[in-house]
Image (tube, grey):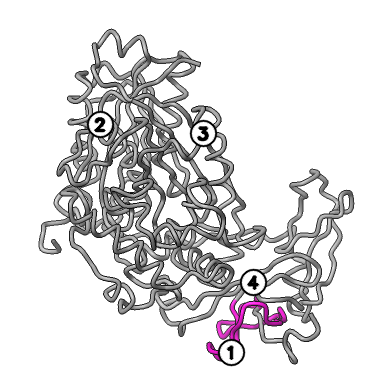
Amino acid sequence: MRRVAIIGVGHSKFGDRQDVNLKELAFEAVKPALEDAGVTPKDIAYVTVGSIGVWSEEPLPAVAVAEYCGLTGAGLVRTEAACATGSAAVYNAYTAIASGMVDLAAVIGVEKMREVDTSLAVELIGRAGSYLWEFEYFGMTFPSYYALYATAYMNRYGATEEDLALVAVKAHKYGALNPLAHLQREISIEDVLSSYVVSWPLKLYDSCPISDGSAAIVLASEEKVRELRIDTPVWIAGVGYSSGTSTLSYRNDFVGIEASVKASQQAYRMAGVGPDKIDVANVHDCFTIAELLAYEDLGFARRGEGFKMIREGETEIGGRIPVNVDGGLKAKGHPIGATGVSMIVEQTKQLREEIKPRSRQAPLKNYIALTHNVGGTGHYCYITILKR
Amino acid sequence: MSELPVINSRSLELSYKIPISKTKRFWDGLKEGKILATKCRRCGKLYFPPVADCGACYSSYMDWVELSGEGRLVTYTHVIVKPASFRDEQPYTVAVAELKEGVKALAWLTNVKRKDIKIGMGVRLVPKQFTDGRVAYVFTPLTGEGRDQ
């Protein structure tokens, strides 16, 4: 296996992007990523596109996006792993370089979710669990899946709706500082608690918005890093992946995501570090409960004590391990295929100490960052550990 | 940003024909008032929802077994914001319960007031005919809930 570095990153504004189509939106991330890396589209040998794509007009978006970005001719594939699609696309390109097949690859995560109305988007995401047994007769939605975990978690460990609200308040605090975030305003605990119930106990402000957005990265082999004289390569030090059952009732319990536990252990092993060495992280907070589960699944907190971390402010800048200081899925937005790539973009910039405004830059001790990207409700999980 | 120019694409209506030949016994069972599961004849693994092939030992010899339907509530949620195709439904409660036989099931929880729902309460999974004529199954509270668990 060869070492692989991130040498270029790009990120569009997330939000309601009716001003651009899917291809134009992808271009907004690909252009700065290639410029950052100092390469041209013709240099890219392999492209992975992370996109779900059912909510916009191109059913098979990879080829359309590649053509628009001048990448026609490169090896090309669309990757799908539900909400972990972006990270799966990163992993796919990572292995292409690590294996020696190519020296330079691009990953493009892009999603346009707002070309259909909200109730249809809710339907399309809800169908993506176990269709026949959970949607056909019972109309499960994505918030409902996480609500089942929230109910079980709060009942087992004594966490409250206020604890969940604190996760949203933190996300919005940092989202307000991120010019690329979908929701750029601070909110209070009261705002969260008084927002309407989506799927009890989860409320509107416990939930990420439905967003359009794109993010892109350029990956290179160590040889290529030297050839291009990249001064701040960020290395992929560890990757981990796992999956859970499609049918929720086949799961053992609803107080943690088993796929996250397995994937993170694999990534820690490969990187040769433990959770105590992580300076800053992005975790998958599609709903507030998901962030608390992640603290525990990733080993930042003991089982049943994740909610204490948010109460104590341990995951804010200045705390033990800053988490989602770009606003997270909750405030930055969750354009599904873009999300995992966006996490890598954020952590690459954190490790390069390029975050603006500086109030959003996490202090670095070990120069190690982690991204945690869950697909579905623990149907998929990808972990990536980065090191400068 | 809803005032920006767009082209409305051609619309598409999608409905899939989902094959149930291999699990037809289950759907027939519902009409007879039974909740059926499949049990692998080789390794003994019990499946609900039922399957035709055992993913654990790769046998395709499955026996149909009737479940008591009795179980204990594991978790639940009240779905308020519904998907487009459930637009005309009242808000519904979805629950997961662990049945006596050791398998879990996910279904609507009906015939109970929201304030009376408690994790650990006794429930029974029963066949149910919906207003559109389709037959599935729902949980209802077990009489004397919890005591016999």
Count of labels in the image: 4
Disc 3: which residue = A267
- The Cα atoms of the two marked residues, 1 and 2, are separated by 52 Å
Residue bearing mark 1: B116
Position above or below: A214 against A9: below
Q: Which amino acid lies under the numbered mark 2 shown in the image of this protein?
A: Val
Give the letter of the chain under mark 3: A
The stretch of residues the image draws in magenta is: B108-137
Chain of the residue under the numbered disc 2 shown in the image: A
Pinpoint residue A172: horizontal percent, then vertical percent: 25, 60
The quadrant of the picture occupied by the C terminus of chain B is bottom right
Q: Are marks 4 and 2 in contact (CB under 8 Å)?
A: no
Q: Report helix, strand or loop for mark 4.
A: strand
Which residue occupies 31% across, 79% down?
A: A194
Compare marks 4 and 1 and give the one earlier in the sequence: 4
Q: Which residue is mark 4?
A: B74
Q: Disc 3 vs disc 4: which is toward the camera?
A: 3
Q: Secondary structure at mark 3?
A: helix
Please tell me which residue is depicted at 52% across the width and 35% down the height of the picture. A240
Estimate the x, y position of residue B126 in percent, counting from the top left: 71, 81
Residue B82 sits above or below residue A182 on the image: below
Task: Classify 10 Å Cα crowding around label 4: few (below 14), some (14-19), many (20 and above).
Answer: many
Left or right: A152 as drawn, with respect to B100: left
Q: Residue A9 shows which numbered tag?
A: 2
* Residue B132 falls left or right of residue A188: right
**Are dots 3 and 2 in contact, CB under 8 Å?**
no
User: Which residue type carries mark 1?
Assistant: Asp
